[in-house]
Image (cartoon, rainbow, N blue to C red):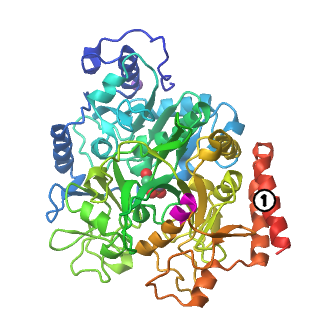
Amino acid sequence: TLIPPAPTRSAAKPVKPGSVNAPEGADPRVVAWVASVAELTEPADIVWADGTPEEYQRLIDIMLEAGTIVPVPKRPNSYLARSHPDDVARMESRTFICAEDADDAGPTNNWRDPASMRQVLGGLFDGSMRGRTMYVIPFSMGPVGGPISKLGIEITDSPYVVASMHAMTRVGTAALEAMRGTTDWVPAVHSIGAPLAEGEQDVAWPCNSTRYISHFPETREIWSFGSAYGGNALLAKKCFALRIASVQARDEGWLAEHMLLLRMKHEDGRVMHLAGAFPSACGKTNLAMLQPTIPGWKVETLGDDIVWMRPGEDGRLWAINPENGFFGVAPGTSEKTNATAMAMMEHDTIFTNVALTADGDVWWEGMTKEAPEGLIDWQGRPYDPANGPAAHPNARFTVRAEQAPSIAPDWEEAVPLDAIIFGGRRPTQVPLVLQARDWEHGVYVGSTVSSQQTAAAEGTVGEIRRDPFAMLPFCGYNMGDYFSHWIDMGHRLGRHAPKIFSVNWFRRDADGGFLWPGFGENARVLEWIAGRVAGTAAGVDTAIGIMPAEGSLNLEGLDLDAEVVDELFEIDPKAWLTELVDVEAFFGQFGHALPTGLVRQLNHVRWRLEHV
Ligand code: PEP
Ligand code: NA
Ligand code: MN
């Protein structure tokens, strides 16, 4: 058995729309493709999602009935889902790029031969939806018909996925209508892999321990089996908007990136649009919702996870957040770290794997200093620290973008980018902020992003790992080619190119304390970046990039000793030269795919460090 092919311009044999419950007027190729998936997976019923509030309520009722979710009484229209304890996060080891040629997947992806993967998946999906409803979700990333938008269809047998897609994408009839007369949409199939036999009792979170999150970049297909969690199952997000879209972006001359997007504006009329790439657990959501501590400035949120960017007719780089909501990590979120996020979750939120309080509210580590009495943990047990944290470290909230008090009123429109920042969690060495000398140097800075491993993930805590452009788990092709694509984009943009910066909020002193207060105070760094873009802030060229000139970073009202400021910007040439050995080894794996521009930049930085 094979999984069916992606739709092509000339449809296979026509299928009667009524036989798969298709809405009137659906493109015949959409209908034929849905029929081919139904024939393989054998669902009991087929429902086409229309994206209406009534449909959302029906999904909620189905999940309440099945025990997949429970109400959160303290928050209107809010629910808690408890997943299977082995289905709690994206699984990079089960994520595959099935390009015809292994070189096109590159050294940083798990490659599988597409023909044999089609066979493996064919066996798994055969009858995998028996006894369940198959949902067909037409969706748009970006507003339907927008100049940077893209269409897709996710088929799934999980009502939790459908409800989440309602928040995270634009679901429904308008997207389906936009697919008429075109095959430029991404087919994505998801099954939890838990068919129900006649009369069999269902469980609250059905899933399968065999898991495949498979991408076919050449034919733009996604097939995901076994998991119902986050990026494994909401296929519009990481699978489409990053892995498949990065390939589309390479072929079509644009960029699909793992970035936040914000507007920072001053009362006096200054405006800056900034995109920022940070690995997971480095505060993208917090930065996107930042409340500046310095007077006159305000931040408007545009997006917190994914940015699509395209050169416009004016030569500038225009950006959108293709998503429709936020799927954020709950632990660590508090009134202090992100009051905006706390406000947006007061109602109409789906929480997953958080703890419940005795009085019917949600709780997670970091929300308050002390855990309240009488907690129920994320697995539904009375909280006992011996069992680990009350909320799973990867517990999530899912909300619509419009619920964020900081959301820009025009957040669905494209914005012209002024600045791009790259950051990670670096306890030593990397200064608070520096500007890349030019675009090619900026691509070098992006390609060498690295971050400290956190306790939430596998690996040695504290170990520094390279995560170029924060895209290591999300680039759908060879990252060496990806670096070249970025360099080419700079040639195309020329003097209109956004300025590129590196930031590090996480540098520590000898006693392990953070040197920089972070959070709202990060607005000071953004202000300097805005000044560099406008040509008003002074900088000093150093071996590793341009740093703020004495007095150009606004530290007014901050109680920081001069030595602390010096430490925040200290460059240790010896440590940097050692780091370059690691960078060189990292680059080495890309072989001939590594652009010469990055080798040139590496050699330049090394020469400068040796001659300080
Ligand atoms: C996800 O699992 O879909 C997800 C958003 O992942 P991350 O937060 O690690 O980027
Ligand atoms: Na079948
Ligand atoms: Mn992310």
Q: Nearer the viewer, residue 598 or 204?
A: 598
Residue depicted at x 62% and y 79%: 550
Residue 429, image quadrant: bottom right
Q: Is residue 95 left or right of residue 49?
A: right
Q: State the residue lying farthest toward the top.
A: 13
The quadrant of the image that shows the C terminus is bottom right
Residue identified by numbered label 1: 602
Q: Nearer the viewer, residue 277 or 354?
A: 277
Point out residue 606 in the picture as x, y percentages from the top left corner.
81, 66
- Note whether residue 605 is visible: yes
In the depicted structure, whether residue 339 falls above or below residue 488: below
| Quarter holding ligand 2 | top left
Point out residue 572 in the picture as x, y percentages from the top left corner.
74, 79
In the depicted structure, whether residue 297 falls above or below residue 348: below
Point out residue 489 in the picture as x, y percentages from the top left corner.
64, 41
Q: Is residue 326 left or right of residue 539?
A: left
Point out residue 107 in the picture as x, y percentages from the top left corner.
70, 47
Q: Which residues are magenta?
A: 529-535
Q: Would you say the magenta stretch is mainly helix, strand or loop?
A: helix
Disc 1 residue type?
Leu
Q: Is residue 517 left or right of residue 420?
A: left
